[in-house]
Image: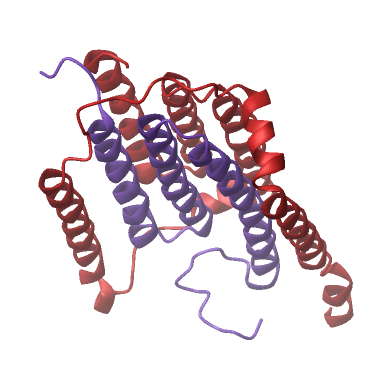
């Protein structure tokens, strides 16, 4: 397993990137921080004996999904998005403090559970074969039906996106 | 300092990333940033899946991550299409101004 010092460095980068995404005023910067976070987690996947998942993480998450985010940001106009302030109406101002409080409570519950239960155990399982070949055999033998259902899900989302994206005709009629 | 990183370290990191994602959903008003925060939370759950797969010596956790990534991709595609459609009709993606079921 990985030594604590490189793990702490990687974890610090991941948390800093997540905080950067959270606090960045510019949506493009947020998307780039998200890429950094995904890349760091991909390195952790490599450490955790999951090379295929690490590569999928980089191509699908850091590649496809974030590029989709950037496309939409550019499509709507990054300057326009900068006008989206996080100011809430006066009567709801306390919501911000309530949100931070709730997040701290959630973190406290996580920490409490982690301290109460030692998930670590004493023995570490031996490294198993997690090559794309072994993963594919598991996927297509034991999880074939969920895999097929995933195809239906993707089809449904494609149809949904096409329908949502095709509203221009109705807009012309209204105009 | 302990000599090796065990599963507890990964649980802690995953919990911190999840809380940051939840905080993003609660604090930010920009719908796109909201979606990014949801991705962050899904990603922290994936990290936990892979960490436990390594800890237990099973491959099933990694297969499940594969499915989660697929669902996340589909969800982002539909969600961003919704955001674009909402922006066309309301000229805003501030979630405080999206409070009507009628377009």
Residue displayed at 42% across by 61% down: B29
Image coordinates for residue B25, horizontal then vertical, percent: 39, 58
Q: Would residue B92 appear left or right of A12 to someone viewing this image? A: right
Residue displayed at 55% across by 84% down: B100
Q: Quadrant of the C terminus of chain A?
A: bottom right
**Image quadrant assignment for residue A95:** bottom left
Image coordinates for residue A88, horizontal then vertical, percent: 33, 68
Give A88 or A164, whichever is nearer the viewer: A164
Colour convention: by chain
Which chain appears red? A
Q: Would residue B58 appear left or right of A52 to someone viewing this image? A: left
Residue displayed at 35% across by 31% down: B55
Give A23 or B82, whichever is nearer the viewer: B82
> How many dots with numbers?
0
Which chain appears purple? B
Q: Would residue B17 appear left or right of A112 to someone viewing this image? A: right
Q: Quadrant of the N terminus of chain A?
A: top left
Q: Is residue B10 above or below residue A73?
A: above
Image coordinates for residue B79, horizontal then vertical, percent: 62, 60
Q: Is residue A103 above or below residue A136?
A: below
Image coordinates for residue B56, horizontal then vertical, percent: 37, 34
Residue displayed at 22% across by 40% down: A119
Give A14 or A53, whichever is nearer the viewer: A53
Q: Would residue A119 appear left or right of A137 to someone viewing this image? A: left
Q: Is residue A76 above or below residue B93?
A: above
**Image quadrant assignment for residue A33:** top left
């Amino acid at each position: 397993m990985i030594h604590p010092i490189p793990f702490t460095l990687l974890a610090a980068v991941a948390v800093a990137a997540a905080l950067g995404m959270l606090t960045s005023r510019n949506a493009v910067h947020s998307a780039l921080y998200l890429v950094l976070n995904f890349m760091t987690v991909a390195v952790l996947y490599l450490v955790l004996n999951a090379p295929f998942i690490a590569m999928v993480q980089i191509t699908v998450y850091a590649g496809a999904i974030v590029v989709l985010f950037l496309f939409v940001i550019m499509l709507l106009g990054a300057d326009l998005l900068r006008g989206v302030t996080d100011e809430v109406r006066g009567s709801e101002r306390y919501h911000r403090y309530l949100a931070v409080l709730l997040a701290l409570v959630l973190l406290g519950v996580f920490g409490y559970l982690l301290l109460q239960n030692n998930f670590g155990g004493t023995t570490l399982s031996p490294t198993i074969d997690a090559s794309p070949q072994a993963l594919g055999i598991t996927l297509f033998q034991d999880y074939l039906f969920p895999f097929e259902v995933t195809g239906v899900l993707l089809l449904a989302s494609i149809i949904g996106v096409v329908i949502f994206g095709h509203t221009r005709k109705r807009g012309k009629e209204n105009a | 300092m302990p000599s090796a990183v065990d599963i507890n370290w990964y649980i802690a990191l995953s919990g911190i990333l999840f809380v940051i994602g939840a905080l993003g959903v609660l604090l930010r008003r920009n719908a796109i940033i909201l979606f990014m925060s949801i991705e962050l939370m899904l990603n922290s759950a994936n990290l936990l899946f892979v960490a436990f797969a390594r800890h237990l010596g099973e491959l099933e956790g990694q297969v499940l991550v594969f499915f989660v990534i697929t669902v996340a991709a589909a969800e982002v595609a539909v969600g961003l299409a919704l955001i674009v459609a909402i922006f066309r009709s309301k000229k805003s993606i501030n979630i405080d101004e999206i409070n009507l079921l009628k377009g």
